[in-house]
Image (spheres, rainbow, N blue to C red):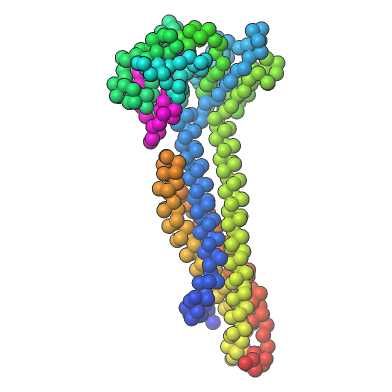
Amino acid sequence: MSFLETFQLAISNIRGSKMRTFLTMLGIIIGVTAVIVIVGLGNGMQSYITDSFSEMGTDNIEVMVYGRGSSRNISVEDMYELADENPDLIGGLSPGLSSMGKQLKIGNETITTTNCQGVSEDYIDMLHYTVEQGRGIEYIDIKECKKVCVVGKWLADTYYGGDALGQTLRYGSDTFTIVGVLEQRYDEMEEGGADDYVMLPYSTVARLGQSMVNYYVVQAADETRISETKELIEDALYDVFQSDDYYMVISMQEMLDEMNGMISAIIMVLSVIAGISLLVGGIGIMNIMLVSVTERTREIGIRKALGARESVILRQFVIEAATTSGLGGLIGIALGYAISAAATPLVSAMLGAEMAVTPSLPSVMMAFGISAAIGIFFGYLPAKKAANLNPIDALRYD
C-alpha cells in the first residue's frame, strides 16, 4: 500500500467518526491557537515599543548628573568639550534643565501638567521632532538667553486655538514669546501627554533659576558604537566624581533591548504554558488511537492474513494519528489568525495607540510542526501495538 493510499484511508477513517476526531483534536487546536495569538501579541508589543523608542531616537543617551557639591561637578562647557574631542562617537549634545518649580501661566490660568524644559538648539532634531509652524530653538537664543519658547501641538490647540505663533505665556514671573509649534507626534493628544510641553533655551532657564544644568541628551555619531559612546561618557564623569553614585548614564538602545528581552521571556513562558494543551492533545490522540486499534482488531487480522507486513500496519496508524494532529494544527492556525485579527482593534483601543497583533511565520510553522510531531510521537505506541498483533488472535477477536 502506497503512502497516498494510506493517507486516503486515514482521511476516510477520520470522516467516519467526525465528532470523536474533533474532540480528539481539541487540545491541539487550543494549543496551536494560543501559541499563535500569544506570539502575535508579543510581536505587536515589540514593534510598538520599537517604534516608540525610534521616535525618541534609539541613538540617544541620557545623562543625569546629581553632582557632588560645588568642588566636584561637570559644566556644560566640559560636556561640549568632550563632544568636540570625540566627534567619531558623539554626534550631538543638548543640555537640559527642568522647570525647577516655576509655574506656567497662559492668560489667567495656571498650568501644572505641562512639561517645561530648557534645551539646546539641537534637541528638536536629536529627538526627531518636526516643526509645524515657525522655528525651533536656535543658537542665538541660547547665546543671548532670549525669552522665547517652542510649544507642543496639544498646548497650541487647547490654549491658542491652533494659532500660537507669536503669542506669549508666562514662565515664573517672565514672559516668553512662542516662536515655534511642533507637529503632533501621537495619534491621541491629552493633557500631560507627549504633545503637551514647552521647550525653552536652557541658558535662559539656568539664568532665571540660577541653577546648574543637571541633564544631558547625547546623540551617538554611530549607532553601531553606542556602547562605546556610553562608556566614554561614564569614564569622563567618573574622572570628575570618582564614584558612580553621582550620575546615571542610560542608553535608549539598551533600554529598548532590555524591554524587548523581558517581553520575549514573558511570551516564551506563556507559550510554554499554552503548549501544555498540545501535550494534553497528544495524550488524547494516543488514547483514541488505542481505542481505534481495539475496535479494528479484526480488520488488522484480516490484513495481516492477506499478507500485510508489520511496517505497513505501523505506517497506517502513525499516518492516521499524524493526520488527525496535523488537521487540528491547521484548524488552530486558522483560528489563531482570526483571533489575532479580531484582537488588533481591541488592543489598540485599550492602549490608545495603533498596535497590531501579528503572528510570525516561524511561530506558525513551529506550532504546526509540533502538532504533527505530537501526532507521530503519541501515535507510535498504538501503531506498534497494532503492528504486533498476532493475526490468528486478531481474527478470533470479537
Q: Is residue 360 magenta?
A: no
First to last magenta residue range: 180-203
Percent x, y for residue 310? 64, 82
What x and y, as percent, mark residue 314?
Answer: 62, 78
Residue shown at 57%/28% (left/top)? 251
Res 43 visible: yes
Q: Residue furthest top?
A: 144
Q: Nearer the viewer, residue 21 or 126?
A: 21
In the rendered image, residue 202 lying in the magenta stretch gets the answer yes
In the rendering, at what x and y percent does residue 92 appear? 50, 19
Image quadrant where one finds the N terminus:
bottom right
Name the residue nearer the viewer: 243 or 82: 243
Image height check: is 302 above or below 120?
below
**Residue 255 falls in image quadrant:** top right
Can residue 136 be seen at all in this image of the molecule? Answer: no
- Residue 197: image quadrant is top left
Q: Quadrant of residue 322?
A: bottom right
Q: How many circles with numbers are drawn on the protein?
A: 0
Residue at x 64%, y 81% (from the top left corner): 386
Q: In this rendering, is residue 337 above or below 390?
A: above
The residue sitting at 36% across, 16% down in the picture is 108
